[in-house]
Amino acid sequence: MYAQMVKTDAKRVKRPEEMSEQERAFQARIDRGEKIEPKDWMPEDYRRTLIRQIGQHAHSEIVGQLPEGNWITRAPSLQRKAILLAKVQDEAGHGLYLYSAAETLGISRDELIAMLHSGRMKYSSIFNYPTLTWADIGAVGWLVDGAAIMNQVPLCRASYGPYSRAMVRICKEESFHQRQGFEILLVLSKGSAAQRRMCQDAIDRWWWPSVMMFGPNDEASPHSAQSMQWKIKRFSNDDLRQRFIDVCAEQVKLLGMRLPDRELKWNEERQHYDHGPIDWSEFYNVINGNGPCNKERLAVRVQAHEEGAWVREAALAHVEKKRRRYA
Ligand code: FAQ
């Protein structure tokens, strides 16, 4: 069901002698650190790789509203409700910047959304997990937004201009999201025994799915080599994952909680935390459509799109009326 339609064939990186003159000139621009802009010549696979990544990213922001949106009416205070509402609205904004960036590559938002709804394009695995308690909203902010920032700050330097510029604002907002999540957990961690249990339980459930957000191990990542050569990705999946683990292993101490990994241990020689094995069968199960909430998430998006059809039709009718009036 989740076979990717925007296929890119980039498993093997071309050597300079295998490139056309145009491709060599393009790679030289990338190597010099120049930004590629929409009207510049680009290899077809570069364009398709960006549509795949930016499209998946946009879909993730939009689907990513659902787990937290679920808690807006149940936030424990008016202030918490206002903050959560603003955060969820920010995610909608991120989706819009990213759909706009993808559109500069010659694909429409309608086409991208149709591919999401028919299962031909992915969104992040993480949004297929349920938010069971209020502490989950803290864990999503701390861990999910935290992982998102770790992955996205380097994207501010991605070689494609519209994508890199969209990421600057997104990262500023994500960093506020990460802090608000941590603060929710900090309050719970200083609360009653039941609140502390709730806090630990949310961390236990969100930790491994957050670690998986960075994608497969480097040797199992078909797109990384080419995306790094094109400077779309600036660091590998495993490098970013390791940085995330190192940061969280320290931050969790401030909460007086623990990460659910018995093998987590500082390695003096590597200057990094060692960690336990990742259950990749769970990751592939989720990205193949069989996670706890995949069907529900997609059904909600499709329903929202269908129920919003009248708004799109009314907007188009308004434009048409104005066009006729001023023709
Ligand atoms: N989920 O060869 P690679 C957020 C797929 S935004 C699902 O390593 P690549 C904000 C991948 O597409 C979170 N699929 O691929 C927020 C490929 O499939 P394909 C989203 C995944 O592209 C917070 C296959 O596996 N962020 O959280 C995942 O070089 C809170 C092989 O993988 C972005 O999209 C996954 N986790 O590297 C919102 C950032 N990982 O196409 C609301 C931009 C991998 O062959 C609330 N994207 N796959 O069928 C990226 O940086 C990259 O696309 C990666 C994957 C690193 C995600």
Image (cartoon, rainbow, N blue to C red):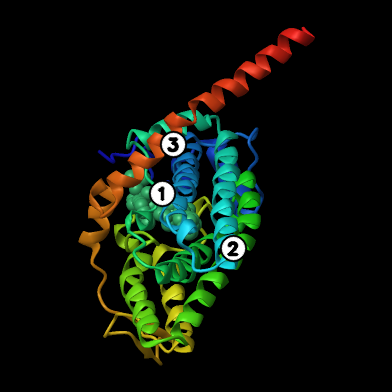
Residue indicated by mark 3: 304
Q: How many labels does the image show?
A: 3
x then y, percent, for residue 137:
45, 66
Q: Is residue 7 visible?
A: yes
Horizontal placement of 99 versus 268: left or right?
right
Q: Distance between the residues labelled 3 and 1?
A: 41 Å
Residue type at numbered disc 1: Val
x then y, percent, for residue 61:
49, 50
Mark 1 lies on a secondary structure that is loop
Disc 1 or 2, which lies upstream in sequence? Answer: 1
| Viewer-side residue, 225 vs 19 | 225
Q: Can residue 227 be seen in this view?
A: no
Residue 179's image quarter? bottom right
Residue indicated by mark 2: 83
Mark 3 lies on a secondary structure that is helix
Task: Classify mark 3: residues with Cα within 10 Å, few (<14), some (14-19) or many (20+).
Answer: few
Residue 274's image quarter? bottom left
Disc 3 or 1, which lies upstream in sequence? Answer: 1
| Labels 1 & 2 near each other (Cβ < 8 A) | no
- Give the numbered dot on residue 13: 1
